Amino acid sequence: MKLSISNLSKTYPNGIQALKNVSLEIPTGMFGLLGPNGAGKSTLMRTIATLQEADEGEIQMDEINVLEQKDDVRKLLGYLPQEFGIYPKVSAEDMLNHIAVLKGITKAKERKEVVDALMNQTNLYDVRKKNLGGFSGGMKQRFGIAQALIGNPKLIIVDEPTAGLDPTERNRFLNLLSEIGENVIVILSTHIVDDVRDLCSNMAIIDQGQVILKGEPQELIDKLKGKIWQKTIERQELENVQAEFNVISTRLFAGKTIIHIYSESEPDSSFKSVEVDLQDLYFSRLTGASNGVS
């Protein structure tokens, strides 16, 4: 299965153009949509999920026209939005049963098998009788994935799924996504670079409503080899360094500032070449430093 997005655009009534001629080919597997908050990721996800209209463009999922055949899409879709409501006084098991009925699983025996399997898959079986209002953030996210998986969807969309999770819950959640993404399309929309690095074989970076880079993460990283340089400076030196070099990122360490810059060749002997990672790729494109690398 493949999802094809062609020249998709969306402008809101307040004049904000959230999507500008977005085109992407998304194959089976984990696909990372990376970008800062406000980049247009959620708008794109909601449009694919048939929750809002586009102004222009097309989305095709194999033979299905996503923008016109919404009911057909919804039969194949599992969706975990950035924020989703729960009924705090309803147990996880009862809520999944209710959602299963809404998705057409009306036979009690079949529904119990589906719900039990999903609760086991998301490691929630032992708390299936617990009210959702008593769930931790990570448990709620895993419940969100459980409800998204009802009906064996072929397309799963998860929007900022690990934001606010502690490291243990984040790892548990990412492992779950990785298992799910072997045979279906899973679109992981996030601003967290590590989530894409750890999971996705294909990715795109979106900023200000536009796709500014797309491809396989390692291939894109390889193109930056030998072009990212590091130096440790005093904090008060930063402004002068930024005026002279293409600084793509900074971080404080032990009271000093570590900078990464983009340069085709060694800036000077005070810099050292570093092994490029996905974070360098991400920041170099957001700052425009490596726009010549495609």
Image (cartoon, rainbow, N blue to C red):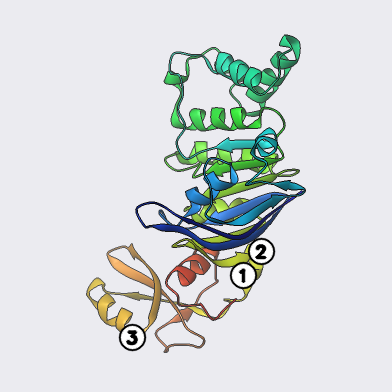
Image mark for residue 77: none
Q: Secondary structure at mark 3?
A: helix
Which of disc 2 and disc 3 is earlier in sequence? 2
| The disc label shown at residue 244, or none | 3
Q: Residues within 10 Å of mark 3 (few under 14, many from 20)?
A: few
> Taking 113 as reference, is 163 left or right?
left
Question: Which residue is farthest left?
Answer: 236
Dot 2 lies on which element?
A: loop
Q: Amino acid at mark 2?
A: Glu
Mark carried by residue 216: 2
- Give how far across and how far down residue 230 sits, in percent: 43, 76
Q: Is residue 57 above or below residue 269?
A: above
Q: Residues within 10 Å of mark 1 (few under 14, many from 20)?
A: some
- Residue type at mark 1? Leu
Disc sitting over residue 220 in the figure: 1
Q: Nearer the viewer, residue 35 or 38?
A: 38
Q: Residue 118: percent from the left, percent from the top?
A: 66, 25
Rendered residue at 58%/42% (across/down): 49
Count the numbered circles shown. Answer: 3
